[in-house]
Structures are given as structure tokens and as C-alpha cells.
Image (cartoon, rainbow, N blue to C red):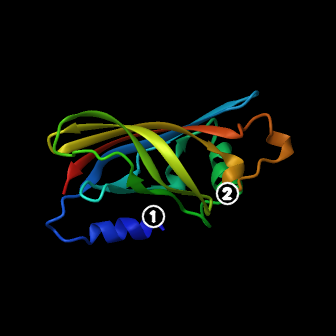
């Protein structure tokens, strides 16, 4: 769904000023009793339409690097996230606050939309920090994802090694098209 939104935002008329991710990363941490797992991807993609206060983000699940071993990364993609079946995680929706994108400053905002992971969509409100600097937007966000809300099962054998609640951090710099 967010992929369609990304495509439709990309095809908007040239007079609409869009911001596209120039540089973006997403990282996650699973802090379980017996193990801490961290991974990061620099392949975050996204658009913001300031006129409509809409946004769309997408990340290829197989792009995450890090983990504690290559086997752990393989299990992440094949067993838990099923990355070949559900290749992208997406988040799209609308910024709740009425931000003036032509006024520089740092703002606390709430992004309301649909977060899709592992083929399961959940409506979420995610708090973020938005910094506006002339023709650049910087977005920073920290939030959690509950595995059970996205139908991601953890086998009992590794239950103490994978947290049920995953900490997620996003950093993105947008520039005007």
C-alpha cells in the first residue's frame, strides 16, 4: 500500500513541492534476557508532501546488516520476517500537526498512518522530531514494534534470545525535488 503511495506521490505534478529522502537509515534493537541483537539499513526511502502533510516510507527487509552472526541474519530474513514473501516494511499516512514547512525550526510532530510489517497492517501514531532548514527536512524518530502485532512468531527454543518488543530508530534527511 505504501509503495503505491510512494509511486503516486512521485507522479504528482511538478508544481507540488515534494521532499524526498536524500539520506536515511533505520536501525533496530532486540534486547532480550539472553541476547542483544542490533541491525541497521541505510536503504530507507520516503517522500513528504508538505502541502497535504502526507508521507510514505519504505525499507527493504533484506537490506538490514549487523546481527551477531550471518546465521542470525539468515533466520531474520527466512524464518521470522519472511523477506522473500514480504520484501518491504512500509509506513504511510499524514502528519497530524499543522506544520508550516516554510518556517525553519524544530518541531515535535505525530505521524498517523498504517505501519505494515510482515504483511500485517497496524494503524499507528508515531512521535517524531522534524527539523526544517531552508530546503532540507530532518526527521528523527524512536518507537517500538510488538512482534505479535505483526504476526511474527518466536519459537520457544529462542524465546529468551529475541525480545517481543523491538526498539526502532529512524534518521532521515529530505531535500526538495
Please name whichever residue, 84 or 108, is drawn nearer the observer in this view of the structure.
108
Which dot marks residue 78? 2
Q: Is residue 45 above or below residue 105?
A: below
Please name whichever residue, 157 or 68, is drawn nearer the observer in this view of the structure.
157
Please name whichever residue, 148 or 86, is drawn nearer the observer in this view of the structure.
148
Earlier in the chain: of badge 1 and badge 2, it is 1
Helix, strand or loop status at disc 2? helix
The part of the image, by quadrant, that contains residue 8 is: bottom left
Please name whichever residue, 38 or 171, is drawn nearer the observer in this view of the structure.
171
Residue 145 screen position, x and y as percent: 61, 44
Name the residue rendered at 85%, 42% in the picture: 157
Q: Nearer the viewer, mark 1 or mark 2?
A: 1
Helix, strand or loop status at disc 1? helix
Query: Marks 1 and 2: CB-CB under 8 Å?
Result: no
Residue 82 screen position, x and y as percent: 65, 60
The part of the image, by quadrant, that contains residue 139 is: top left
The furthest residue to the right: 156
Residue 124 screen position, x and y as percent: 54, 50
Side of 84 where 55 appears, left or right:
left
Q: Is residue 14 above or below residue 44?
A: below
- Which residue is identified by label 1? 2
Name the residue rendered at 71%, 30% in the picture: 35
Name the residue rendered at 18%, 57% in the picture: 177
**Circle count:** 2
Name the residue rendered at 41%, 38% in the picture: 128
For the residues labelled 1 and 2, the Cα–Cα distance comes to 23 Å
Amino acid at each position: 500500500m505504501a509503495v503505491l503511495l510512494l509511486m503516486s506521490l512521485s507522479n504528482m505534478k511538478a508544481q507540488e513541492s515534494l521532499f524526498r529522502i536524500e539520506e536515511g537509515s533505520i536501525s533496530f534493537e532486540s534486547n532480550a534476557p539472553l541476547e542483544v541483537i542490533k541491525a541497521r539499513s541505510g536503504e530507507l526511502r520516503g517522500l513528504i508532501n508538505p502541502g497535504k502533510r502526507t508521507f510514505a516510507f519504505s525499507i527493504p527487509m533484506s537490506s538490514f546488516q549487523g546481527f551477531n552472526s550471518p546465521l542470525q541474519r539468515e533466520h531474520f530474513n527466512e524464518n521470522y520476517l519472511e523477506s522473500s514473501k514480504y520484501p518491504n516494511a512500509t509506513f504511510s499516512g499524514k502528519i497530524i500537526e499543522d506544520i508550516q514547512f516554510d518556517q525553519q525550526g524544530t518541531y515535535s510532530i505525530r505521524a498517523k498512518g498504517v505501519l505494515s510489517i510482515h504483511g500485517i497492517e497496524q494503524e499507528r501514531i508515531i512521535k517524531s522530531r522534524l527539523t526544517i532548514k531552508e530546503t532540507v527536512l530532518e526527521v528523527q524518530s524512536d518507537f517500538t514494534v510488538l512482534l505479535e502485532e505483526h504476526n511474527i512468531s518466536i519459537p520457544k527454543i529462542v524465546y529468551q534470545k529475541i525480545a517481543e518488543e523491538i526498539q526502532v530508530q529512524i534518521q532521515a534527511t529530505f531535500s526538495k525535488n
